[in-house]
Each structure stands twice: as structure tokens, then as C-alpha cells.
Amino acid sequence: MDHKTTLTRHINASPDKVWAVISDIPGSAATLSGVASIRMLSEGGYGEGTRWKETRTMMGRAETVEMWVSQAEPPSASGAGSTTVKALQGGADYTTRFVLAERDGGTDLALTFGAEMVKPTLLGKVMMALFGRLGMSITKKALAKDLADIAAKAESL
């Protein structure tokens, strides 16, 4: 059973400024209020293969997850760009995709988050059916806050 949600926010900043914020993994703990810490696992700039460990606090509990960039396409001359970040944790495959599109002197930033159970057991399927909607509701609120934090940072650059 898959769970997916998409949120979009218009940001009063250029796609290049928005990209600078979402691709600044080392600085994301200072930008995103939900992120407690970042530990880089790879060197170099943002791109496919960039890896890090991110610690977030959700529902009063800190959780550290290893994440990596599986796709990165910086904004082109048209103002369009995208990136995909993946994580595997607790039997789930998580995918976060950001799509940037220039519009009205700013940027529409769409964030799609999906969770898919890897080799789900019967118990896992039952738990996802019972608690999946609640978990996605909590996740959606956290993602909306991330978008607000990204917008605030990009608009201040």
C-alpha cells in the first residue's frame, strides 16, 4: 500500500534562489525548523549520489535517517528544475521530489512525498491501513512547514 501527498507553494524568489536553498544540505538544519542536525556522508556539491544523515524530531521523537539524491536537474534557462531524494527506513522506501517552475516573477515549488512498504508483511499491511492516514497527515503538516521555511529563506536571499 502506497501513500503519497503533493503540496505546492509559490515563492517570491527566482528558481535559482529556491534551488540554492533546497540543494544546501549542510545548511538545511539552519533553514528547516523540523531538522535538528545534518551529517554529510559524501563530499562535493549537491548532485546525484550526495548522501547525508538527517535527524528530525516528529511527535516529540528524534529520528535519524540516511538520505541520498537520486536525481538532480538544476533550473534551466526556462526556470524549470527538479530533484529527487530517497531514504529507506523501517521497511519503507521514501521518495521526496521537488519540482521548480518559474511563474509570475517567482517560483512554484511542488513537493511530492511518497512512502511505499518494501516487502510488506501482513502485520505491516494492517499497520499501514490503520495508521497510514494519520502518519501521512502528520507528515503533510511537517512538509508544509518545510515549504514555508524554504520560502522564507529563498525570499531573504
Image (spheres, rainbow, N blue to C red):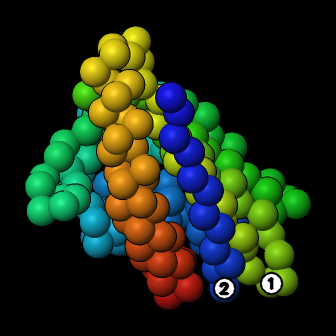
Badge 1 density bin: few <14, some 14–19, many ≥20, Cα 10 Å: few
Give the quarter of the image for residue 60.
bottom left
Q: Assign a secondary structure to mark 2.
A: loop
Give the quarter of the image for residue 84.
top right
Q: Assign a secondary structure to mark 1.
A: loop
Instruction: Find disc 2 in the rendering and name its residue.
Output: 12
Instruction: Find disc 1 in the rendering and name its residue.
Output: 105
Give me the residue at 30% from left, 33% from top: 127
Give me the residue at 34% from left, 16% from top: 122
Badge 2 density bin: few <14, some 14–19, many ≥20, Cα 10 Å: some
Q: Tell me if 31 is positioned left or right of 98 in this view.
A: left
Numbered mark located on residue 75 in the image: none
Residue 39 visible, this angle? no
Give me the residue at 56% from left, 45% from top: 4
Residue 124: % across, % down: 31, 24
Q: Tell me if 74 is positioned left or right of 54 in this view.
A: right
Tell me how far mark 2 sits from mark 1, CA to CA.
Answer: 7 Å
Give the residue type that dot 2 points to: Asn
Q: Tell me if 11 is positioned left or right of 144 in this view.
A: right
- Which of pointers 2 and 1 lies earlier in the amino acid sequence? 2
